[in-house]
Image (cartoon, rainbow, N blue to C red):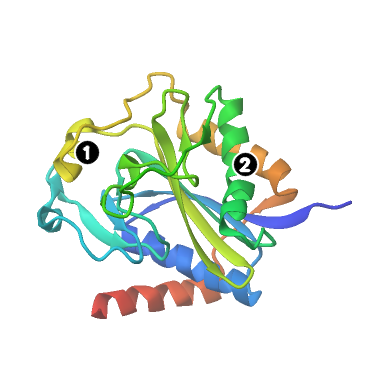
Amino acid sequence: MSRNAWRLLPLSCANGATQMAIDAAIFRAVESGESPPTLRFYQWDPIAISLGYHQRNHPNHWNDLTFLGATVQLVRRPTGGRAVLHQGDLTYAVIASGFADKRSESYRQICEFLIQGWRSLSHDLSYGNAGRGYIHNPDCFATVTGADLVLPTGQKLIGSAQKRSGQTILQHGSMRLTPNPELFETVFGETDRISNDPEMPTIDRIIDALVDAAETCFDASFLVGSLSDVEKSWISQNLQRNQTE
């Protein structure tokens, strides 16, 4: 039996508004049948804080943050959850259909490729437990929910969020690889809960391991591709819309 045909987009690095516009455009294209199921990995340049779609309040000093002379951007995600500082991290995005209708179950179906991939890199991850006060804390990585993946030490390595329309899901999440503790404390006013791991694999190794795991978990055959002309048009529209809001 042949595997499902998925698209793998090469690692990209762009500003937060562009990355969120890309995810939103791919989601729309997959939902409409314009594009195949897609897996991609990306990074944020310059550093940014992404706010959850429904997150309306954040500390005032976030509007004027800088790091190494560059402005820390504020960007809104199309998914829920709390704020994430995108510095020294790698973000994944899965955009596809065919997962469970129940949100908690679809999280587990998708997160399985993260667990298996990181296990092959000698990093065991498990699901977190929902903590009290999650809604009232602006920092996504200050609390752990059932959608998060934690190390044996209890430190949260991956936080994920979803957007859903019908059977189509966008799930993306941040993997914290080389966080800067001083910047974290400046942003959130508390000590970082995760420390740098001297044995952290390179980004290329992480991506290779996760793609291999995704092939098994999603019964997928990946073909490296690029954004379609339709997606590029929607990305441009998303960026123009955001500039006028």
Gap between marks 1 and 2 measured at Cα: 28 Å
Residue beneath the point at 19% across and 58% down: 58
The residue pinned by badge 1 equals 184
Considering the image in quadrants, where does the C terminus appear? Answer: bottom left
Residue 69 is marked as none
Q: Circle 2 sits in a helix, a strand or a loop, which is it? A: helix
**Can residue 209 be seen in the rendering of this structure?**
no
Q: Residue furthest front?
A: 132
Which corner quadrant of the image does residue 166 belong to?
A: bottom right
Q: Which residue is identified by label 2?
A: 112
Q: Residue furthest top?
A: 198
Q: Nearer the viewer, residue 104 or 181?
A: 104
**Location of residue 65 with respect to 25 vertically, above or below:** above
In the rendered view, tell whether residue 23 sits above or below residue 157.
Answer: below
Residue 216 appears anywhere in the view: yes
Left or right? Give the position of 74 relative to 114: left
Identify the mark nearer the N-term, 1 or 2: 2
Mark 2 Cα-neighbour bin, 10 Å: few <14, some 14–19, many ≥20: some
Q: What residue type is labelled 1?
A: Phe
The structure residue drawn at horizontal position 62% and vertical position 41%, both measured from the top left corner, is: 113
Q: Which amino acid does label 2 sit on?
A: Glu
Please tell me how crowded label 1 is: few (under 14), some (14-19), or many (20+) other residues with Cα within 10 Å. some
The part of the image, by quadrant, that contains residue 95 is bottom right
User: Looking at the image, which is closer to me, 226 or 187?
Assistant: 187
Q: Residue 165: x, y in percent?
A: 56, 72
Number of numbered callouts drawn:
2
**Residue 18: image x %, image y %?**
36, 63
